[in-house]
Image (tube, coloured by chain):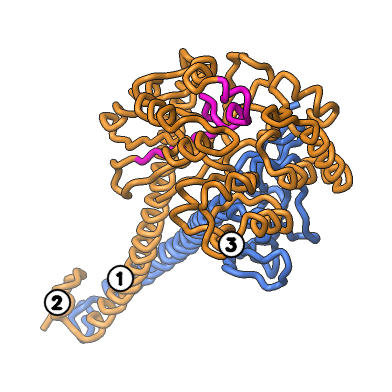
Amino acid sequence: MRKTLRCGFSESERGFTYIEVMVALIILSLAGVLIWQGVSASGKLLDKISARSSSTMRLMQTEEAVREFVGRIKIPFWMSTMDLEGEEGEITVPFYEGRNDTLLVMKYEDSSLIIGTRRADGEQMEGVKSFGPFSNAEIEGARDEEGKLFGITIVLYTGETLSDGVHITARFGSNPLWAKDLS
Amino acid sequence: MVCISRHGSEAILCGQKIYRKVRENGSTTVLILGVLGFLSVVTIGTYLFLQYSIQEIRKYETKEKRRNALVEEAAKLVDMLVQDTTPYADSRLDAVWEYITESEERKMHVTLTDVSSYYGINWVRKEILDHSSLMKFGKSSVELQQYRWDTGLHLNLEPDFQEFFSAGILHSFFTPYCYFNINICDEFAVENLYFLRTGDREKARMFRLKIQEYWKESTPGKPRMVEPGDLEGFLGSDFAVLFPILNASPAINIHFAPEEIVHQLLSYQHHNVPQSTAEFLLYNRSTQEWNEGELESIIGERYRGTFLHHYLGVTTWFWRIEIETRSGEEGPISLKWIVARIPSGQKNSDEREYRLIEEEFFR
């Protein structure tokens, strides 16, 4: 007589189901590992895309603000020369909104690019805006081929390497009749 | 009950043990569903963020395009000024004004303003100020001269000169955008200009004394003046650094000057030109364009015999161009340019050159 178990399965049938479930679990586990790897890779990719996108947005906002601030520098047309001043990592430009007693101050401090104004005879900055974080920033006067100063160039570094610096060149809102230019 | 089926739904009916195995498979499915759900949320979040970023980038590009359109229009206007068929004079009859009238059809609002045909706030002389009675009550031209000497040259009428003039007077009679005619400038203002251009205070003082000495040789009714042809000789080596900011060209264009300024200059005691002449000039200037010779024949011998020909001329030196676009989803944007015509340095030269002095965008 054929041996029958409690639920009516034959012995051979019961063994086959167990192996089948095991195989199914192994397949599912493998699939799970693969899916997890995929999820993990996708997550990393998404993080990268978000970081890059966020960095681009930050740079765009910084660029717009830099252009706006530097655009408000109005060096009177009667000036013949002008030098930029400032310590390392900082630059000051006179003639903010055409006033010779108001300076535009741009500096890199605590991973941020800081822009504001200052009275020529004061030390307190006003209207300060901060942009970043950036891993580094270089600020200098922008000059044309003839050496004439026409704006400010800022190199912003968003990553660890120095190769990924983004150059922003903002023009002054005015263009004086430099003596050199007219001679 | 005997059940030999290995398929899920039937197996459930068969017994507790097999039922449990089906439940275990189901849990794995829930796990996968959870992972997929999580993935979907992350993907949707990223998609929305990227959409926002793309939108911002497009906005930025659109703004750049609109700005470029404004710049092109302004450049076109400057080009028309350069191409003017009567380069010796600027008036309402020039082709550029017709082009401006047609600008509304291009969905742009364009304005062109002569900003130099006023008294130069940085150089106007005490005598002219005293004659015109423009200063605030209690303020004198001597105080203004001292203020300018102490604080240098100014690009802003307000708030820099509010102490001396009301806002209405400042904007109706004065400008910071003008050259310095050596014959009609306050000599201390010229000293300040010299200092700014060279950085040498002592040489600036000597230059001021040189001008004062030159004027001392004037005889009654015959003032000594530096004419455009004599300027280079008079300035010598300083010509290279001072010209064209300091020149000998008439500062104010009769075709665009405010009526009050024309009246004041012609009626000034040392110029003494009949008011009927002023009336004639003001009445006809919108329909006629004069060159300097014609202006001289209208005004008479007082024009060349006095400083009048250094005040009044027919050329505009600084223009303000304002352009506003009215189309676009992001509202109107506008551009303001100040352009300067560079004097040629040679009398009667038709050579024209304009420089962009200031640029500003508004939203």
Q: Is residue B220 left or right of residue B205?
A: left
Spot the blue chain and give its letter: A
Quadrant housing the N terminus of chain B: bottom left
The amino acid type found where label 2 is placed reads Cys
Marks 2 and 1, how far apart at CA: 26 Å
Residue B238 image position (x, y, % from top left): 82, 31
Q: Is residue A19 above or below residue A34?
A: below
Residue underneath mark 3: B139
How many residues crowd around disc 1 within 10 Å: few (fewer than 14), some, or many (20 or more)? Answer: few
The amino acid type found where label 1 is placed reads Thr
Marks 3 and 2, how far apart at CA: 115 Å
State whether residue A169 appears in this view. no
Q: Chain of mark 1?
A: B
Q: Is residue B210 left or right of residue B159?
A: right
Residue B190 image position (x, y, % from top left): 73, 42
Residue underneath mark 1: B29
Q: Is residue B196 left or right of residue B16?
A: right
Q: Is residue B352 above or below residue A85?
A: above
- Image depth: mark 1 or mark 3 in front: 3
* Of residues B351 and B136, the one drawn nearer to the viewer in this rendering: B136
Spot the orange chain and give its letter: B
Indicate the secondary structure of the residue bearing disc 1: helix
Q: Chain of mark 3?
A: B
Q: Is residue A7 left or right of residue B251?
A: left
Q: Is residue B272 above or below residue A43?
A: above
Residue underneath mark 2: B3
- Residue at 42 percent across and 66 percent down: it is A32
Indicate the secondary structure of the residue bearing disc 3: loop
